[in-house]
Amino acid sequence: MIKDNRPDITRLITVCALILIFILIIGALRAREHSFFRTGASNNKNREALPDTVKRRDDIQSNRWPKGFRLLRYWWTGGAAVYIAEMDRTAKNLQFYAELANDQILGRETITDATRRLMEKDMLPLAGVNGSFGIREDNRGRGGMMFNLHIQNGELISISTPLDKWGYSPPTAWGETSFGVTPDGEFLLDRVKLNGKLKIAGDTLPIDAINQICDSSCPAVIYTPRFGRRTLTRRCYEFTLRQIQLPLTGKYTSRFLVTGVNPRGNSSIPFDGVVLAIEPGLARDWRDKITKSTAGTLEIALTPKKWQDVQQGIGGNLRLVRDGKVEPELIEFGESRGGSAYRHRNAASRHPRSALGFNDEKLFLIAIDGRQPGYSMGMTLSHMGTFFSELGIKHAINFDGGSSSTLWALGKVANSPAHGYERRIFNVAMIRAK
């Protein structure tokens, strides 16, 4: 007699169900065992009015809050944990700050390492969230490089041209995604334009970007010492400009002298000068006009005009909320499940996310955990826009997300990053003590 070796269907279903329950339990325990939770998170006791989409709000480490600062965790009914660091805009002891990883464009750094480096300079960071988009590495030796705007202490360190592809701000109203703070404390949220010009003997060359990748979509780029040691370009026609004033700013004019010409690219960037890189197609019109010992003028005038005085600025890639309402293009994007902007269609799926928002009273740094069954599955951009509007956030932009989503606060990582560890990132949107 032949014995039937077919699996018992009932037993198989039971085993699968047990495995699923085990995965959900592990996901929940993983979050609860996070070191930050063990320091004490108390349920909200002040009974503030909360949206119906909030199951509960926890005050995290409230005994350590300085005046004008709060660290909160919202449990969204859709199945996500949302961490928010809040700063009162009227707090005289606090300010927004944009910090560049490793103090240069090339390379990445964890928020923990960046805050440690700042504390060695006698600064006191209170909270920080990962900011701009970029590439982690490529075959040209760029071991990390951001795509978005960065202004730090008034220095214009990075600005790209609007491009409708992942990581960049698209050239539409939805792409108004750079946040800046003026010297008098005004918050700005705009699409910022460089308006850079190189003037030589009556000819004018438009400059497309500062410290970005030089290619056919961005054919004329200025590289400053903030980029790194070399430009890492290929086949670009490059000119070394010295006797030029540094650093670059939002309103800038300086004379220069060409001291070197390199037709092969990947030039060294002098500590006391800059490199002008021109893409090969455009370079044909300029290589005979710009030669060694050529003198000229570099001009920069950011627009909108208020950005010429911005002291701290950081870019994302898509606007979520405008004047308290979900951005119209985001509504269309959500209804079409990403079809209206297919280059950003990843944003129509649930993932960990990071963002910055503000209203008339507060600044918000936000991280949403995801990809952790039983604890938090993340949000789409449409979820974010709707939820932020319900919380009373008047304006909000999207930052880099996924496993990079990290909110550091009061000395340690507050959320639970998707990979279980803190990933190195490009720059930090930060709340710090003055």
Image (tube, grey):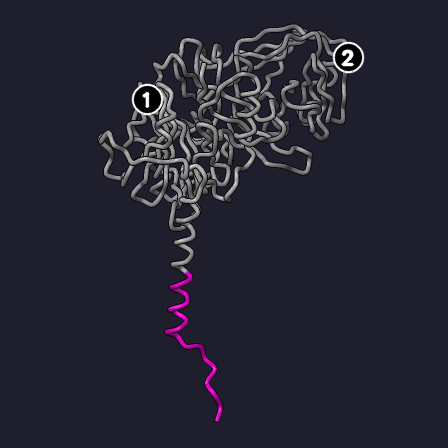
- Residue located beneath label 1 in the image: 359
Alpha carbons under labels 2 and 1: distance apart: 52 Å
Residue 226 covered by magenta stretch? no
Q: Is residue 276 above or below residue 355?
A: above
Nearer to us in this view, 194 or 84: 84
Q: Residue at x 32, y 25 (%)?
A: 394
Q: What is the number of callouts on the image?
A: 2
Secondary structure beneath disc 1? loop
Q: Which residues are magenta?
A: 1-19
| Residue 170 appearing in the image | no
Q: Residue at x 47, y 34 (%)?
A: 413
Residue 317 x, y percent position in the rendering: 46, 30
Q: For label 2, count other residues whose C-alpha is less than 10 Å away and answer few (under 14), some (14-19) or many (20+).
A: few
Label 2 or label 1, whichever lies nearer to me, is: 1
Residue 260 x, y percent position in the rendering: 77, 15
- The mark found on residue 249 in the picture is none
Residue type at mark 1: give it: Asn
Residue 276 x, y percent position in the rendering: 67, 18
Secondary structure beneath disc 2? loop
Residue 15 covered by magenta stretch? yes
Residue type at mark 2: give it: Lys
Q: For label 1, count other residues whose C-alpha is less than 10 Å away and answer few (under 14), some (14-19) or many (20+).
A: some
Residue 142 x, y percent position in the rendering: 65, 32
Quadrant of residue 120 within the rendered picture? top right
Q: Is residue 23 above or below residue 305?
A: below
- Residue located beneath label 2 in the image: 292
The quadrant of the rendering that contains the C terminus is top left
Mark 2 vs 1, N-terminal side: 2
